[in-house]
Image: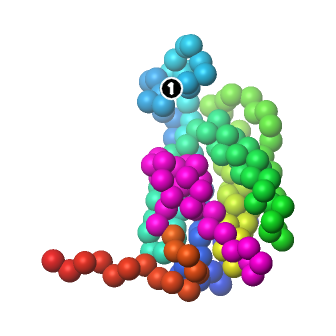
Amino acid sequence: VPEPSGNAGAQDIRIVVKPQWHIIEGASPRPDPDSKSPRPARHVEYEIELSFLGQTFNVQRRWSEIRDFHDRLKSLKDLNKRTQMSYQGKLRNKMKSTLDPKALNARMTELAALFFSVEVWANALRHEASFPTELLKIPHVAEFFTRVMAPLPVFAKPVESAPEPEKP
C-alpha cells in the first residue's frame, strides 16, 4: 500500500483510506436511481478521509460509488489533454459481491492505491505551470468527499491561505 509523501505541504491535498470497512445492515439510505428495486439489505462501506487547507472530510462510500467516481475522473478528457500529467488511477472493472473479510481487505488495499494516485494527480494539477487546476473545484469531485454538490473552499493560487475565522 503506498504511503502518502512525507514532504507534503500544509496546503497539499491528502487522501487516506482508513484501515477499516463497515458492514451496513438494512436498506441503503442512498437508493440507486436507475434501479426499480431497493439496494441489498447488507453492504460494505469504506471510510475515506480528505485533508486540505486544515479541513478534514470523512466519508463512507460503497464500492459502486467509488467505481463511479473513478469512471468520472477518467472521463475528464479535456483536463487530461491540457495538463502534463493525466489521471492514472486503476480499479478493477468487476468485483464479486462479497462480505468475506479477506476479500474486503484486498479491496481496501486496492482502494488505498487508487486514492494515492488521485492524491498525487490532484497535487500535481495544483502545481502545474501551464494550466494549474483545482480538482476539488469540480462539483462532482467535491460531492464525493463531502456529500454536498458544491466546490470545496479552495483558492485560486496554491500560495493563498484560508481566511482567518471571524472573532466573536
Identity of the residue drawn at 45% across and 49% down:
148
In the rendered image, which residue does mark 1 sit on? 31
- Residue 101's place in the image compared with 12, above or below, is above
Q: Which residues are magenta?
A: 128-153
Where in the figure is residue 112, as x and y percent of width and height? 68, 56
Q: Farthest residue toward the left?
A: 168
Label 1, secondary structure: give it.
loop
Image quadrant where one finds the C terminus: bottom left
* Amino acid beneath label 1: Pro
Q: From the top left corner, tell me how far across and down residue 82 is, in percent.
A: 81, 66
Q: Is residue 137 magenta?
A: yes
Colouring scheme applied when the structure was drawn: rainbow
Mark 1 Cα-neighbour bin, 10 Å: few <14, some 14–19, many ≥20? few
Quadrant occupied by the N terminus? bottom right
Question: Which residue sits at x=77%, y=50%?
Answer: 74
Tell me what residue is drawn at x 69 percent, y 79 percent.
Answer: 127
Q: On the picture, is 125 further left or further right than 60?
A: right
Q: Is residue 40 above or below residue 151?
A: above
Q: Nearer the viewer, residue 44 or 161?
A: 161
**Measuring 50% from the left and 21% from the top, which residue is drawn there?**
41
Find the residue positioned furthest to the top.
36
Measured from the top left, where is residue 77 in percent x and y?
Answer: 80, 53
> Residue 100: within the magenta?
no
Q: Is residue 162 above or below residue 36?
A: below
As drawn, 44 above or below 129: above
Image-based side of 162 in relation to 155, left or right = left
Instruction: Please say whether residue 101 is visible from this viewpoint.
Output: no
- Asked where in the image residue 71 lies, by quadrant, the reply is top right
